[in-house]
Amino acid sequence: MPGSSSVISDNINNINEKVKAAAAKSGRGLSDITILAASKTRSPKEILEAFNNGIKVFGENYVQEFLPKIESLVDYKDISWHIIGHLQKNKVKYITGKVGLIHSVDSVLLAKTIEKHSISQNIVTNILIEVNLAGEKTKNGATIDEAYNLVKEINKFQGLSLKGLMVMPPLEKNNRKYFKSLRELIKDINDKNIYKAKLSTLSMGTSGDFEVAIEEGATIIRLGTIIFGNRPPKNQTRITN
């Protein structure tokens, strides 16, 4: 049964072995890769099962789904929540201070909004810039040129800490070229000292291509169905126990 405890446990054990093998190809180990469980539509019970099997980072796409989950799991202090989906400016105020990392910053306006709410709470919010390397009109993300400009703008902000880059490439059989391009982009940004600190986080790779992403330098992989099984139908979305 998708999402059952034994299935999730077995899946995570298998994933760990694959991550370890892929990481070795780039001279790294399992501990160098953060396995993020993409928990959209998943219940707190499923999230806790993954948590109890070693997954500490969970990524949510929708603020309206994220908020009740963190309420129901508030006692689990070791869970780190990330926002991995498109973030609307009017939803920023609800998540500032509640997330460890926002993966999907793709405009100066969004960055400024996060900055404003971070300053008002006297905190620094960790972010990634989402880059649309394939130029897909149906997806969010900055172009490469926009990404350079965005780094320069974020460099001026006090309430944001840029950690690196994220990509959601096309649904293709071989996405290695996009993962390699993101690695080359972060290296160029670092080599040119565009940002005040070195960027080291590459969020790339999902259930179908995470091994290739790790080989190309991913530090965070975003895994959903390979951990939890197939998602429930949309009209049966499970966000409660």
Image: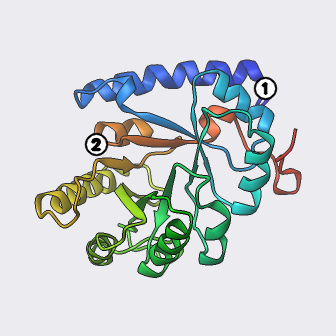
What is the distance, in whole Å, between disc 2 and disc 1 at their CAs? 32 Å
Residue at the limit of the structure toward the left, as seen here = 191
**Amino acid type for the residue under numbered disc 2:** Glu
- SS for tag 1? loop
Q: Is residue 187 above or below residue 241?
A: below
Q: Is residue 241 above or below residue 202?
A: above
| Residue 124 screen position, x and y as percent | 45, 58
Q: Toward the viewer: 112 or 30?
A: 112
On the picture, is 4 further left or further right than 77?
A: right
| Residue 51 screen position, x and y as percent | 65, 28
Q: Toward the viewer: 90 or 167?
A: 90
Looking at the image, tell me whether mark 2 or mark 1 is earlier in sequence order: 1
How many residues crowd mark 2 within 10 Å: few (<14), some (14–19), many (20+)? Answer: many
**Amino acid type for the residue under numbered disc 1:** Ser
The residue beneath circle 1 is 4
Q: Is residue 184 above or below residue 221?
A: below
